[in-house]
Amino acid sequence: MVAPPLVHIGMLRLVIPSKGRLYEPSIRLLRQAGFHLDLDHDRKLMATSEDGNLRVIFARASDIPDFVADDVADAGITGRDLCHESEADVEELLELGFGKCRLMVAKRESDAWKGADALEDGVRVATSFPRITRAWFKEQGTEVDVVPVGGSTEITPHLGVADLVVDLVSTGSTMAVNNLEPVETVLESQAILIADPKKLDEELIGQRLHELEWVLRSVLEAHSNRYLMANVPKEDLENVREMLPGLSSPTVLDLLDQEDMVAVHAVVPESDVFGLVRALESLGASGILVTPIERLVP
Ligand code: AMP
């Protein structure tokens, strides 16, 4: 798809978390996508990008799915976990690569575990995700007794309030500190861009939503890749070509006064850079340069 320039996005309303762990990365992503927001006031509830293309509304991360479904905003950024729990009618447009975590079943370290399907009905599970939890255990064939809590879920098994917990885990250190052991994954979550599916089909707003998705995607693509340049011996060009899978074939340029060398430019995955530089060096490459990419449209 060839997307029209950014200027066509118009005044789209995007609701993002007002605080918490998804706030900073959301603002950073918008800035990188070219939306500059004036965030001077601490308690601002709304901000408009300098170019007038985007109105950003700040809200609690858990309210965002409903705000998008209820037309408070056209699109939103929040955690997939919160979207599933709210059961709001929203469509996931794009994974944003931050806020990664897992919603997991955890037990006391000292308890045995034979699998969720081996549990007896009536086991008490404390969670702030009651809908997801009930549905997931049902799928495993167990009717659990869900104990809804607003926070401090990890303490409940030690207080005799619950037998198990279902909670978000990223590093696992909070669970370990509380003598809990995660045993099964209920949901893989991260921050996502969401929209009302009905609006996606509308002519003008649908196009604007896809443009926003396209702009954000180009920033995310750029961040996972690097632009690599190197001068390589002409006779090794075929080997170098095979080494650089890249997005498209590498650009090869002649070098002034160096007839036996050529300059090779290519877009390569960030995770491959270390290995590629070593391999290029061993082939006699020189002047190796790796730079970040601002936007990438494959
Ligand atoms: P916060 O506003 O900081 O409570 O952010 C909550 C959202 O951040 C959750 O709904 C998840 O989508 C995401 N998240 C990522 N890692 C974690 C974690 N270890 N604990 C809680 N939330 C997390």
Image (cartoon, grey):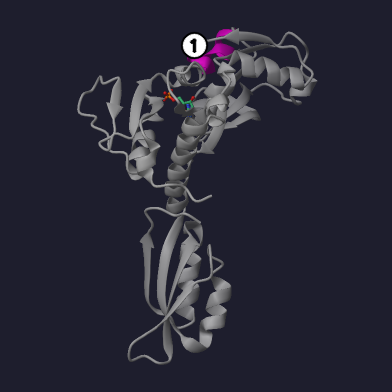
Q: Is residue 157 magenta?
A: yes
In this rendered view, identify the residue nearer to me: 246 or 236: 246
| Residue 19 relative to residue 76: left or right | left
In this rendered view, identify the residue nearer to me: 7 or 283: 7
Residue 269 horizontal/vertical position (percent): 50, 59
In this rendered view, identify the residue nearer to me: 287 or 59: 59
Residue 232 horizontal/vertical position (percent): 44, 82
SS of the residue at dot 1?
loop
The residue under label 1 is which amino acid type? Gly
Q: Residue at x 28, y 29 (%)?
A: 48
Bounds of the magenta segment: 151-160
Q: Is residue 172 above or below residue 42?
A: below
Q: Residue extending furthest left?
A: 40
Q: Is residue 272 above or below residue 187?
A: below
Q: Is residue 85 magenta?
A: no
Q: Residue at x 33, y 88 (%)?
A: 256
Q: Is residue 145 above or below residue 271?
A: above
Q: Residue 170, can we see it? A: no
User: Does the Cβ of the disc 1 residue fall within 8 Å of ligand 1?
Assistant: no
Q: Is residue 140 above or below residue 240?
A: above
> Label 1 belongs to which residue?
150
| Residue 57 relative to residue 160: left or right | left
